[in-house]
Structure formats: C-alpha cells, structure tokens
Image: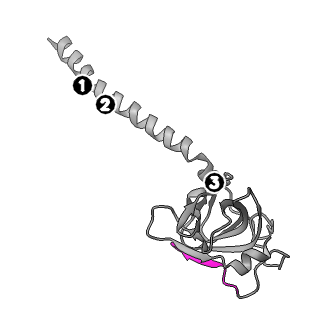
Amino acid sequence: MPAKEKKSGTDNRTPIIVAVIGLAGVLVTALLTNWDKLTKTAPSATSTSSATKPDHSASSNSPPVGQGLKATANEVSYTVRSGHRDSYSDTEYRLVLDVVMSCGDNGENFTADVFRLEADGVKYAPIIPLSNRWIDTHSDWAEKVTFVYPKASQDVKLQVGRAGSSRVAAISLPSSVLAKWD
C-alpha cells in the first residue's frame, strides 16, 4: 500500500510542475519582448546629439518666431521646428515636417499613430515609417514626419497624440506658413 500512496503523491506534483514551466515561459516571453526597454542606458548629461536634442536655432524653413507651432497632448509636447512642401502629384502636396517630441512625466513611442495630418477634416497618416523609438520621460526626440495631402486643402492641421485617445491636440498649419515651405 505505501507504494500506491507514493505514486499518487507524484501525480499531484505534475500540475504544479506544468504550471511552473508555463509561468517561466510567460516570464521569458515578457523579458524578450521588452528587452530593448530594459537594456536602454540613460543619455549622458554631456550628450548633445542633434538627433535627440531639439535644435532651437532658426533655419530657412522654420516658422516665424511666435507662430505657435506647438501643442501638448497627455503631458507630451510637440513642436514643428520646420517644414518643406513640394508637389507630389498634379493634385497632391508632400509635406515633410521636422517635429520634436518632448516628454514630461509620461514617456511615448515616436510612431505613426501619434501623428495625423488633417486637411479639410480628412486625416492622413504619415507615408514613411517612423523610428518607433521610445522617448523616456523628461527627454526629447526630433524626427521628420512625411505626409501627402490634396493641394486644394484650405484648413491644414497636424493632430498629435495617440490615435483613438481623447488626449489629442492640433497644431494649426496656416497657409502663410505652408507657402513659405514651398
């Protein structure tokens, strides 16, 4: 009889072993999925890379001072530093915006679903993939965001903030500024 008791004791351990193996698999998957976030190093205080630090110097395509090409959505500030517009087709413009994302207490990914160009009420997604870079809290990142929209558009805005969220904001792009970017 003692042999049977020992065997039933072994059978009771099988579900526990399976559960532990399953848990280990979930933990390893989570670790591998977020590896890039776990291995990031904080930028040094002496780092001044123009790719990660906003350049506040004026450029030939920058908007006039005080133009107000800024908006904040969910504690993340967005600034259009400059732009360039050219003809994409007979009926469309290509607009390339140099945008700085400055995170406050919330980090954010620099992804296409954070940017939409709204032209006369119709929203357009960026046509060139973005870096999908995670921007840490209290950090900045600058990147070019490219859109195509109809030449006949009268009211153009850059909508910023996570798509589908109620925390979005718009940066008006007046025709006077767009014309300077031609």
Q: Residue at x 57, y 68 (%)?
A: 160
Where is mark 1, residue-wise?
Answer: 12
**Disc 2: CA contacts within 10 A as few (<14), some (14-19) or many (>=20):** few
Q: State yes or no: discs 2 and 1 in contact (Cβ < 8 Å).
A: yes
Q: Position of residue 142 (x, y in %)?
A: 72, 66
Q: Position of residue 66 (x, y in %)?
A: 71, 88
> Which span is picked out in magenta?
67-75
Picture quadrant where residue 123 is located: bottom right
* 53 in the magenta segment: no
Amino acid type indicated by mark 1: Asn
Quarter holding the N terminus?
A: top left
Q: Front-most of 117 and 176?
A: 176
Q: Secondary structure at mark 1?
A: helix
Q: Nearer the viewer, residue 1 or 120?
A: 120
Label 3: how many Cα within 10 Å (few below 14, some 14–19, many 20+): few
> Element at badge 3?
loop
Residue at the extreme bottom of the image, as rendered? 66
Tell me the kind of residue under disc 3: Asn
Mark 3 or mark 1: which comes first in sequence?
A: 1
The residue closer to the viewer here, 36 or 76, is 76
Report how far apart the C-alphas of labels 2 and 1 lie in the structure.
8 Å
- As measured in the structure, the alpha-carbon distance from the residue carrying label 3 to the one carrying label 1 is 47 Å
The first of marks 3 and 2 along the sequence is 2
**Quadrant where the image shows the C terminus:** bottom right
Residue sticking out furthest to the left: 1
Of badges 3 and 1, nearer the viewer stands: 3
The residue labelled by disc 3 is 132
Q: Which residue is mark 2?
A: 16
